[in-house]
Image (cartoon, rainbow, N blue to C red):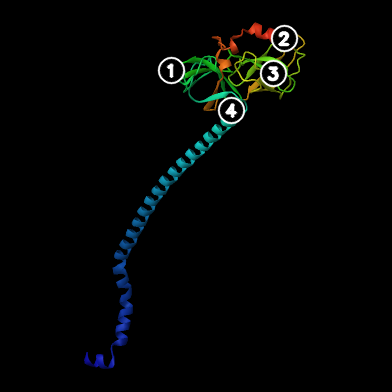
Amino acid sequence: MAADKRFGYMEQARQALGLVATPFFWLADTPARVGNSLGEIFVSRTELLDENARLREELMLSRQRLLLAESLTVENNRLLALQDASALFEQEVLTAEIINVSPDPYTRRILINKGGRDGVFEGQAVLEANGLMGQVLQVMPFSSWVLLITDVNHVTPVEVSRNGERALARGGQDGDTELDLEFVIPTQDIEVGDTLISSGMGQVYPKNYPVAEVISVHRSPVQPYATIKARPMAQVGSTRHVMLVLAATVQDVPALADGTEGGADEESTLAAIESAN
């Protein structure tokens, strides 16, 4: 051992033995290395799963905030449009929100969050930013039912903005998104694309406010009246905010139970239209 330490006779032998023993050392250490690797894999997978769950939660919250922001933007735009529309005429208006829709499939009515305590009265004109909505049918202390212009029992005196031709627009028989123009003789100048505005007859709706757009006209030589359909300008099925016209002259006009404008019966209104034409 002293000679080996002094002269290194066994150095080569030790190197050879170390080289031969290296695979055995590696094999002996394999379980520990495999265990450490598996532990790191499991830890990494758990961390990834936790981070993935956290990111999904953050994404969901971000989507909720985005939807809320979009909803608020849409509502803000509608309120701005309502404000701009109220500036088109000088009458004072009261803003209301739609809180319910009548479940009756045979009527077109909405419930608003303004009632008698807010100065709402029966027969009061209800407008939307884009066009007429209807008129108040029933008043309660804190809410009111509004009969829409698309209800089959509601008749609105209108005129064509292009030439002043007058007609009666009744809620459509075939659905809640159309109006039927009644008692229009074939010679009257009403065409597809014409804009119908309120005529002011009956003193309920403000004159010249948009009502509908003509979407179809059919004239038959064997029929005394033309078949004309129009689409309401108001977003009847999607809007949430409406305006109620607070006009003293309007308040004095009673409303019929069937919702015809201004309390004038259909025959007298038709006679007035025919005499005007």
Q: Are marks 4 and 3 in contact (CB under 8 Å)?
A: no
**Foreground of the two, 153 or 142:** 142
Query: Residue 180, position in %: x, y?
Result: 65, 16
Q: Residues within 10 Å of mark 1 (few under 14, many from 20)?
A: few
Q: Earlier in the sequence, mark 1 or mark 4?
A: 4
Name the residue nearer the viewer: 139 or 9: 139
Q: CA distance from mark 2 to mark 3?
A: 12 Å
- Which residue is drawn at the image coordinates 69% and 7% (left, top)? 271
State the SS at label 3: strand
Q: What secondary structure is marked by label 2?
A: helix
Q: Amino acid at mark 1?
A: Pro
Front residue of this view, candidates 247 and 39: 247
Q: Could you tell me if the residues under marks 2 and 4 are in contact, i.e. CB atoms within 8 Å?
A: no
Q: Secondary structure at mark 4?
A: helix
Earlier-in-chain disc, 2 versus 1: 1
Please tell me which residue lies in front, 239 or 225.
239
Q: Which mark is residue 159?
A: 3
Nearer-N-terminus badge (1/3)? 1
Q: Amino acid at mark 3?
A: Glu
Inspect this view and state whether residue 117 appears: yes
Q: Which circle marks residue 119 in the picture?
A: none
Q: Foreground mark, 2 or 1? A: 1
| Whole-number angstrom distance, CA of label 1 to CA of label 3 | 35 Å
Instruction: Report the residue marked by disc 2.
Output: 274
Viewer-nearest of discs 4 and 3: 4
Circle 1 residue: 141
Sequence-wise first label, 2 or 3: 3
* Mark 1–mark 4 distance (CA, rounded to whole Å): 25 Å
For the N terminus, the image quarter is: bottom left
Report the residue marked by disc 4: 86
Q: Residues within 10 Å of mark 3 (few under 14, many from 20)?
A: many
Residue reaching furthest to the left: 2
